[in-house]
Image: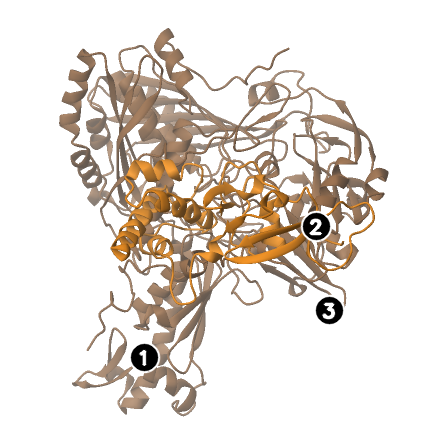
């Protein structure tokens, strides 16, 4: 009798999470919870200036404080060839400033002491003399003639440009635009934001002189990549490096890069021969670690009178901060920006991109997204709404007539991606029905007569999740595969390890469900481990919604290898040939005599006690999975809002989300991911951004200035689903973690813009703060987020 | 004193001011010698090894360090340990008994009210204070009561459900 898959916690079960058992008891094991014997504490002194020459650093007073064990400066790092390190985007980044500081918050010195309070005291005792240099806080200043050169450390760098890049068909696009009935143009800014997990970054480096082994407990979403990078930067042999990523208090892309603090703590441990703990404070996290976005767009959509999209042209200008440290694995300089318009059937497209250095924190991490996909989809959906408005066409209908149709897959997008599946029209229909679209339009018109401003915003998109394939995606040359290793013990219980690393996604729960689905071993009988490079198979980590598309596929594939061996054992136990053995969930049986069977647990026991002659004992294996393509989930997010014309305050009336992420392993967890993503989307649309004043001071360096939505502001969400299995994924799943963050913001902004229809306002850049909305209503003019906030002279 | 938060042991180093503090943590009296500037969160975490109380932002905005102080929710990252002298402190470690979880702990698991788990202890302590004064809160009352606690993972909807779940269970068991 086949097992009931839901009962054993297999695919489709909203299984309650295993990891919760420790978190709800306060027994999580985050990096700051770890205490090693004789551990020292490190504090980093950061630059208060955005661009300044360092004239002198006097650390003598710091050394005088009792309990101080080591004071490190850039000169001391340079003596060990550690003052600079490579970035994931083939640039270099200062670990500690020597010649000059290039952004506010840059690392200038570090103190290692018996206690974190003493280390802080000592940092305050360090005297640094700076000579101010002209500060550049946006790409327009960076590219202006005569602009101060930020990267004077680089040979052959004569300006502040990082790259010029293009993709698509320039001539074809020009032709399409020449033949268009209407060209819809819009300029947008996706402001700088910070992923800001509640837990900051931190590490404990523990170098053991006796064994030569370096163990680093650290907040990383990609422990194996860190091991490779540490081997490279610190010139230590890879087998003598163990990276342990314990429980992470959120990541959202912020914990992918290698940060100077990690490197400095490693050096400090090597020099002191004691474990050194570094826990960043919130300000350090917000002003120095990987930000997201900060891209300007000039977008143009060529359309025919009947609404058919004929071509698209995009030009982006991106602000990368002082070092080009984008954490992205593609060969494309502006990431997957050209995944824009993938859900629309457009004949031709062209994109040009310019990247610049500024005196701002480096990073450019994929903040809950796949490498600029968030910007791509926001730009796309704002351009689509603007074009629908310009045409005078219904925004839902305009999308529908341009969607790639269900039977047009596989579909090659105008920018060159290959999408494989979807039911875009159906998702839109589900969304429109849930929001009661026609009725809302009527309500909106009636409200308008009474002076109330209601609006509805739609955002539909398909996005590429789950890098690689290895042909196009790598990090430092390492291909974007992932891995799983499964050991089935003799009692039929098992341990699974993968190369991914959960930061709250619930891998300990869902990976076991995939094994249960493939092998019929109850999920409760499978323990899942991740994050320790000494035990986990080599993998590329968790970001860009790649866990389920890549590591999850590896889990399915390793389970199938185990099942193939178990089948041979079953044939031996049943005394029939392998061809006569059939499988149902949890059990092999004889085809001609279904009552005669053995369970997967019987096979596990036999693998250690009664294996066939000549068979290697044991029941364990591993799988490395290189996906044939990205996965392409689709989403339709619709929001309704009411704008108060007297104050510019806008309230969300309703949010409907329709997600098609293929087959759902654990629906409860999938819905949790969607609601979390929608909240970050609402955050970016409404309040969450980081800006800089003209002197390069980061405005948003703590939670009093960097606003994150609380339970009070955050709207409720109504979720719906459509399921189109991924044709190339072993269990038909697609990525989901980032979809709502990527597609959500445009639904809110489009809704507010819809409410302002008729006022002459076409765009307000995010975040749609009440004062921006109020000013737009008062003046009837667009509000651009581009210029920096002026400080008092 | 080699550490800021040593349980009574070695005498302090010359020049380091020390105050003796007695506080009740999760029902147990603890006496410690601390520097006056030591934060309560750090005493709990490093001194008393109760690492379920987390520090997130250092500015009392995120609420990961929320504990109950004489039954009221406070941010332990912006209170000095010496201010707790003679007071009662409850942390997440005091929620469960050896044999059973607190209904809030069950509710958070049942309704998927957590993902990374970092804000969870503070969230549950804030919720405990609410339910003790208001056993039958509305969704709005819950949202207001936890608005001093930030969560970056869940979007709050399931946290609200978790607290409603716990409230219902607690009402049931008190009838």
The quadrant in which residue A519 appears is bottom left
Q: What element carries label 2?
A: loop
Residue A203 placement (x, y as % from top left): 63, 52
The quadrant in which residue A398 appears is top left
Residue A92 placement (x, y as % from top left): 66, 40
What's the residue at 52%, 40% (across, down)? A365
Compute the Cα span from label 2 to label 3.
32 Å
Q: What element carries label 3?
A: loop
Compute the Cα span from label 1 to label 3.
42 Å
Q: Name the residue under label 2.
A: B4
Q: Mark 1 points at which residue?
A: A600
Image position of A390 (left or right of A443): right
In the image, the chain rendered in brown is A
Instruction: Give the label on residue A211, or none.
Output: 3
Instruction: Say if labels 1 and 3 share a chain.
Output: yes
Chain holding disc 3:
A
Chain holding disc 2:
B
In this structure image, what is the colour of chain B? Answer: orange
> Would you say the residues marked 2 and 3 are in contact, meaning their CB atoms lie under 8 Å apart?
no
Q: What is the image's colouring?
A: by chain
Q: Is mark 1 on a helix, strand or loop?
A: helix
């Amino acid at each position: 009798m086949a097992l009931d898959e839901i009962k054993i916690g297999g695919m489709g079960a909203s299984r309650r999470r295993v990891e919760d058992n420790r978190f709800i008891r306060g027994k999580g094991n985050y990096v700051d919870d770890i205490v090693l014997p004789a551990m020292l504490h490190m504090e980093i002194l950061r630059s208060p200036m955005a661009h300044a020459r360092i004239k002198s650093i006097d650390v003598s007073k710091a050394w005088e404080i009792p309990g101080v064990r080591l004071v490190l400066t850039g000169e001391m790092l340079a003596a060990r060839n550690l003052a600079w390190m490579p970035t994931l985007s083939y640039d270099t980044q200062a670990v500690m400033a020597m010649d000059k500081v290039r952004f506010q918050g840059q690392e200038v010195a570090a103190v290692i002491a018996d206690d974190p309070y003493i280390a802080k005291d000592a940092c305050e005792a360090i005297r640094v003399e700076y000579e101010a240099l002209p500060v550049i806080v946006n790409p327009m200043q960076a590219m202006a003639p005569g602009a101060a050169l930020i990267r004077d450390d680089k040979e052959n760098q004569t300006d502040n440009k990082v790259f010029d890049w293009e993709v698509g068909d320039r001539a074809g696009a020009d032709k399409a635009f020449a033949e268009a009935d209407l060209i819809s143009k819009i300029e947008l800014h996706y402001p700088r934001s910070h992923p800001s997990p509640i837990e900051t970054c931190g590490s404990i480096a523990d170098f053991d002189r006796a064994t030569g082994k370096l163990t680093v407990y650290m907040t990383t979403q990609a422990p194996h990549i860190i091991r490779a990078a540490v081997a490279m930067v610190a010139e230590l042999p890879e087998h003598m490096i163990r990276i342990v990523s314990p429980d992470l208090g959120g990541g959202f892309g912020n914990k992918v890069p290698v940060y100077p603090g990690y490197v400095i703590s490693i050096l400090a441990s090597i020099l002191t021969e004691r474990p050194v703990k570094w826990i960043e404070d919130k300000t350090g996290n917000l002003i120095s670690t990987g930000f997201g976005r900060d891209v300007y767009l000039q977008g143009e959509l060529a359309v025919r009178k009947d609404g058919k999209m004929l071509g698209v042209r995009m030009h982006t200008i991106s602000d990368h901060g002082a070092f080009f440290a984008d954490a992205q694995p593609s060969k494309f300089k502006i990431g997957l920006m050209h995944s824009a318009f993938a859900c629309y059937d457009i004949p031709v497209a062209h994109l040009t991109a310019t990247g610049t250095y500024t005196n701002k924190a480096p990073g450019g991490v994929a903040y809950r997204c796949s490498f600029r996909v968030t910007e791509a989809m926001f730009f796309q959906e704002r351009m689509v709404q603007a074009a629908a408005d310009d045409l005078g066409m219904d925004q839902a209908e305009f999308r529908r007539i341009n969607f790639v149709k269900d039977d047009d897959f596989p579909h090659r997008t105008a920018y060159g991606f290959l999408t494989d599946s979807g039911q875009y029209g159906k998702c839109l229909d589900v969304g429109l029905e849930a929001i009661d679209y026609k009725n809302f339009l009527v309500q909106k018109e009636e409200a308008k007569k009474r002076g109330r401003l209601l609006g509805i915003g739609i955002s539909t998109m398909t996005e590429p999740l789950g890098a690689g394939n290895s042909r196009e995606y790598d990090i430092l040359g390492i291909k974007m595969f992932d891995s799983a290793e499964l050991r089935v013990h003799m009692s039929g219980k098992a341990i699974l390890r993968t190369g991914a690393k959960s930061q709250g996604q619930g891998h300990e729960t869902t990976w076991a469900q995939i094994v249960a689905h493939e092998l019929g071993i109850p999920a409760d009988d499978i323990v899942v481990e991740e994050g320790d490079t000494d035990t986990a198979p080599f993998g590329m980590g968790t970001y860009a919604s790649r866990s389920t598309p890549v590591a999850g596929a590896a889990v399915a594939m390793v389970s199938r290898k185990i099942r193939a061996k178990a089948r041979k054992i079953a044939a031996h136990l049943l005394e029939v040939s392998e061809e006569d053995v059939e499988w149902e969930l949890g059990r092999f049986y004889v085809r001609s005599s279904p009552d005669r069977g053995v369970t997967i647990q019987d096979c596990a026991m036999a693998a250690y006690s009664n294996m066939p002659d000549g068979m290697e004992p044991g029941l364990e294996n591993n799988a490395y999975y290189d996906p044939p393509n990205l996965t392409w989930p689709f989403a339709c997010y619709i929001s309704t809002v009411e704008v108060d014309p007297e104050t510019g305050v806008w309230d969300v009336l309703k949010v409907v989300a329709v997600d098609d992420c293929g087959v759902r392993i654990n629906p409860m967890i999938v819905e949790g991911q969607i609601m979390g993503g929608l909240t970050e989307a609402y955050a970016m649309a409404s309040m969450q951004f980081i800006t800089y004043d003209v002197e390069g001071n980061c405005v948003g360096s703590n939670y009093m200035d960097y606003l994150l939505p609380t339970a009070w502001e955050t709207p409720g969400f109504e979720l719906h689903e459509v399921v189109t299995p991924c044709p190339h994924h072993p269990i038909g799943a697609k990525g989901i973690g980032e979809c709502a963050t990527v597609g959500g913001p445009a639904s809110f902004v489009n809704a507010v813009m819809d409410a302002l229809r008729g006022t002459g306002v076409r765009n307000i850049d995010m975040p749609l703060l009440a004062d921006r909305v109020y000013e737009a209503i008062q003046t009837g003019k667009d509000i651009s987020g581009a210029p920096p906030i002026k400080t008092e002279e | 004193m080699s550490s800021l938060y040593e349980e009574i042991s070695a005498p302090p180093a010359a020049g380091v001011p020390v105050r003796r503090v007695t506080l009740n943590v999760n029902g147990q009296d603890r006496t410690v010698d601390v520097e006056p500037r030591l934060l309560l969160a750090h005493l709990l975490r490093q001194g008393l090894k109760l690492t379920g109380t987390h520090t997130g932002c250092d500015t009392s905005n995120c609420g990961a360090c929320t504990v109950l102080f004489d039954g009221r929710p406070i941010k332990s990252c912006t209170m000095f340990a010496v201010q707790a002298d003679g007071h009662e402190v409850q942390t997440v470690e005091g929620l469960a008994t050896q044999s059973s979880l607190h209904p809030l702990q069950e509710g958070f698991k049942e309704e998927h009210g957590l993902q990374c788990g970092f804000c969870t202890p503070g969230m549950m302590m804030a919720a405990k204070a609410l339910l003790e004064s208001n056993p039958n809160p509305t969704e709005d009352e819950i949202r207001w009561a936890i608005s001093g606690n930030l969560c970056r993972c869940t979007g709050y909807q399931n946290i609200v459900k978790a607290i409603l779940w716990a409230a219902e269970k607690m009402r049931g068991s008190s009838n």
